[in-house]
Amino acid sequence: MSNETVLSDEYVAELMALEAQDCSVKYSTMGLEAFRSSKPKNLAKPNTRFLRQIIRETTNHNAALLAKEAQESQARLDDLTSANEAKQRRLNPGAGDIRRRQLGDISAILSGRKRNRTVESPVADERDSGTSDTGHEDDDPLDHFIGPFPAVQPTVRGRGRISTASAMDKRFSDSYDPRSDTQPDDDYSEGIGSGGGSKDWDESAEAYRDRQKWKQQGAARLRVAGFTEEQIKKWEKGGPSGEKDLDDVRWRKAGEDREWDRGKVVGVDGTTTLALGWPARLD
């Protein structure tokens, strides 16, 4: 069929009739085999050996993981069971356990050692590996012949050196003189005894006079400026910082304007606005 052929209904029906006739002939001669697609002869075969090897390794790896998890679970279960059994034996000991404890305590008392309290030194074990185990691995075998080592004396050099005799021993000595064991007070040696205390007193007195003079001058300046005597007394009492106490508080009587109402103006409609001065009602 060329590209210029028009696909009309009659032409398409004729093609379908020819294909149906051809299929009928093939089916009558070969059956269903005529319609099965045949594989090409040069088709590459899959590498089944490689695939089987991958599947085998994956199966072995999964089996090893499952075995490891089962072993760890069994170990945890055994530890938990052992801990529970030990706890039960400790809380509810049997007759055999009590008997063993009593025998152990008796043997410990007879041998002069406490049960389960022997501390073994690994260094002594290495040194006395050829000797018998008598429970005294830390002892030096030469102690029986030459005696134990002398006690180590602390050696202090420089400042902080330890004296052979303490201060208390010196005071009980026959040659102790209490008159020479005196130490002057710091206040006496540095203050009044050496003239320092008199100097401090003079400075304090001079500072006090300056303060009184400053107050008098300040009060005179306040009087010239027009302040009242009451205000001047408050200034002298509070100092330059102007601190106030409870006596300076002026209490309002009933009906008087309060301090927190300053700057508020109440209108006819009851609204409050801000303004200078005390509150007032606008009519």
Image (cartoon, rainbow, N blue to C red):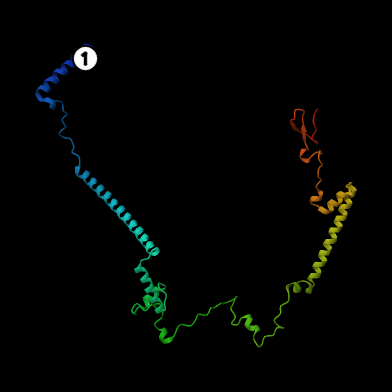
- Report whether residue 242 is seen: no
**Badge 1: how crowded within 10 Å, few (<14), some, or many (20+)?**
few
Residue at horizontal 34%, vertical 58%? 81
Residue at horizontal 83%, vertical 54%? 237
* 90, 273: nearer the viewer: 90
Residue 277 x, y percent position in the rendering? 80, 36
Depicted 251 relative to depicted 151: above or below: above
* 147, 39: nearer the viewer: 147
Residue at horizontal 37%, vertical 59%? 84
Relative side of 267 to 159, left or right: right
Relative side of 79 to 28, left or right: right
Residue 86 x, y percent position in the rendering? 37, 63
**Which amino acid does the dot numbered 1 rest on?**
Val
Relative side of 140 to 3, left or right: right
Residue 141 x, y percent position in the rendering? 39, 82
Which image quadrant: the C terminus?
top right
Q: SS class of the residue under badge 1?
A: helix
Residue 225 x, y percent position in the rendering? 88, 47
* 233, 17: nearer the viewer: 233
- Report whether residue 219 is seen: yes
Q: Quadrant of residue 191?
A: bottom right
Q: Which residue is mark 1?
A: 12
Residue at horizontal 19%, vertical 42%? 48
Q: Residue furthest front?
A: 95
